[in-house]
Image (cartoon, rainbow, N blue to C red):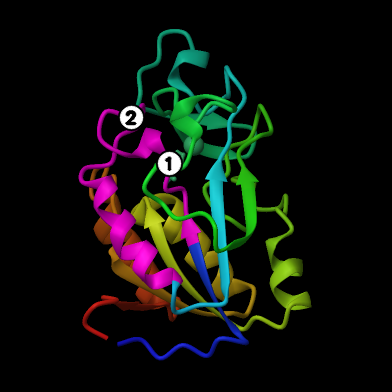
Amino acid sequence: MLTVNRPTDALLVIDVQNDFCPRGGLAVADGQAVVPVINGLMTRFDEVLLTQDWHPPGHRSFASAHPGRTPFETVEMPYGAQTLWPDHCVQGTSGADFHAGLNTTPARLIIRKGFRPGIDSYSAFFENDRSTPTGLTGYLRERGLKRLFLCGLATDFCVAYSALDARAQGFEVTVLLDACRAIDLGGSLDAALAQMRQAGVELVNADAD
Ligand code: VGL
Ligand code: ZN
């Protein structure tokens, strides 16, 4: 069992949305499997935070916005390399809704990201230009939160970027691997796990600890 210190620990649930679940626009294999695990975890925390990928139609991270390009190719954006994705999590669509089974009632904050038409945002802290903040650091600091437990979708993109940024911002970070699922694009999962370990992110299974 995880040891949780309710006053200073937060559960950060990343992008558990229909488009990242089977039959969604950017389906993550077995993505829906995280829902019951996360619902169970929520009862252990006072501070539950959710993120929601929230793109306008025609977002520049969509392959459909780049004539002649196909999903999962890489392009150069003004801020650097960007993977192109199938259309997903368009604001106000059912694909952008949280999975219907996810218990959103305990959430104290829902942070939306990726809403600027020209910048993607994997991390819950900084957009992909690595400099535009979402405001999450300020929220966590003002509330005296020191340690983050991360879960959700996808392990190798939004979860990993959020975990790495959280470390860089000075938080203790644990990723609950059995409450995450990965996209795994060309070895991206192994690379993300190695990067997180190197940065001092603790990687554990919620049900084993
Ligand atoms: C994500 C790719 C594009 C994620 C979001 O939630 O991991 N990945 N948008
Ligand atoms: Zn996205």
Residue 75, percent across and down?
Answer: 47, 28
Position of residue 60 in the picture relative to residue 99 (left or right)? right
Q: Tag on residue 171?
A: none
In the displayed structure, does residue 184 sit left or right of residue 11?
left
Q: At 29% from the left edge and 76% from the top edge, which residue is drawn?
A: 206
Q: Are marks 2 and 1 in contact (CB under 8 Å)?
A: yes
For marks 2 and 1, give the CA distance. Answer: 9 Å
The disc, 2 or 1, on the residue closer to the chain's N-terminal end is 1
Judged from the image, the quadrant occupied by ligand 1 is top left
- For the point 45% across and 55% down, which residue is it? 103
Residue on which the image places disc 2: 24
Magenta residues span 13-42
Which residue lies under the disc numbered 1?
A: 17
Q: Residue 201 in the image: x percent, y percent?
A: 42, 77
Q: How many marks?
A: 2
From the Cβ of disc 1, is ligand 1 less than 8 Å away? yes
Relative to 4, is 87 above or below?
above
Residue 37 point in image, percent of width and height: 30, 64
Q: Is residue 180 visible?
A: no
Quadrant that contains the N terminus: bottom left
Farthest residue in the front direction?
105
Say which of 45 and 58 sits in front. 45
Q: Is residue 129 magenta?
A: no
Q: Residue at x 69, y 72 (%)?
A: 140
